[in-house]
Amino acid sequence: MSVGVAVYRETSDGVDRQVAGTADRQISNTVDRRIAIVVVASVVVLAATIRVGFAWAKGLLGSSFGFDESVYFLGAQHVVAGEFPYRDFVFVHPPGMLLALTPFAWLAELTTDSAAMAVAKVVFGLLGAACAGLVAWLLLRSAWSRRCSAAACTRCGRRRCGARRCS
């Protein structure tokens, strides 16, 4: 979208020179930002639907759990009980998952194990959807920077100037 507003600035030699249209750049940045928000939000919604929605619709959230999920959750319950992995109980995996599941092990003390594990599945599914949105944002940002470096820069008239966004 072009507004057609030109900005003139007096240079050191006393000549008025046209600077890139400020209004054009602002409108372009606003449109780019809106497109980015729509794309990232669409990716997050799609990923959340795939990761959580289908499992919820098929009733798989409260069903039986796989072996690894059970081992991690039981280890997190041991940590909540005050035991230490590797010293008080055998655990052959890195401890990160135990710490991540600790809030859900506390939730299991208030509810049932299957309800707490279902909540954990939903939270980790939404976390995965957020990661997909971050990847989409990084890819969009990379595409914009490539577009900027490939085209002539409107700020200084050179290719590959140091500007983050040229259009």
Image (spheres, grey):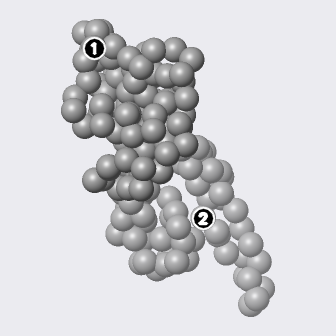
Residue name at image x 53 percent, y 37 percent: 80
Between 105 and 63, the one nearer to me in the picture: 105
Whether pointer 1 and pointer 2 mark residues with C-beta atoms closer than 8 Å, the reply is no
Above or below, 151 against 37 in this view is below
Front: mark 1 or 2: 1
Q: Residues within 10 Å of mark 1 (few under 14, many from 20)?
A: few
* Residue 149 image point, x, y percent: 40, 71
**Residue 111, above or below 37:** above
| Amino acid type assigned to the residue bearing label 2 in the image | Ala
Instruction: From the top left corner, tell me how far across and down residue 161 is, in percent.
Output: 49, 78
Is residue 35 in sight in this rendering? no
Circle 2 — which element? loop
Compared to residue 44, the image places residue 62 above or below, namely above
| Residue at image mark 2 | 20
Occupied quadrant, residue 94: bottom left
Horizontal and vertical percent for residue 131?
Answer: 41, 44
First in residue order: circle 1 vs circle 2: 2
* Residue 111 is at least partly visible in this image: yes
- Which residue is found at the position 37% from the left and 47% from the top? 89
Residue 22 falls left or right of residue 34: right
Establish if 48 lies above or below 115: below
Q: Looking at the picture, tell me which residue is in the foreground, 41 or 118.
A: 118
Left or right: 144 as drawn, with respect to 165: left
Residue located beneath label 1 in the image: 63
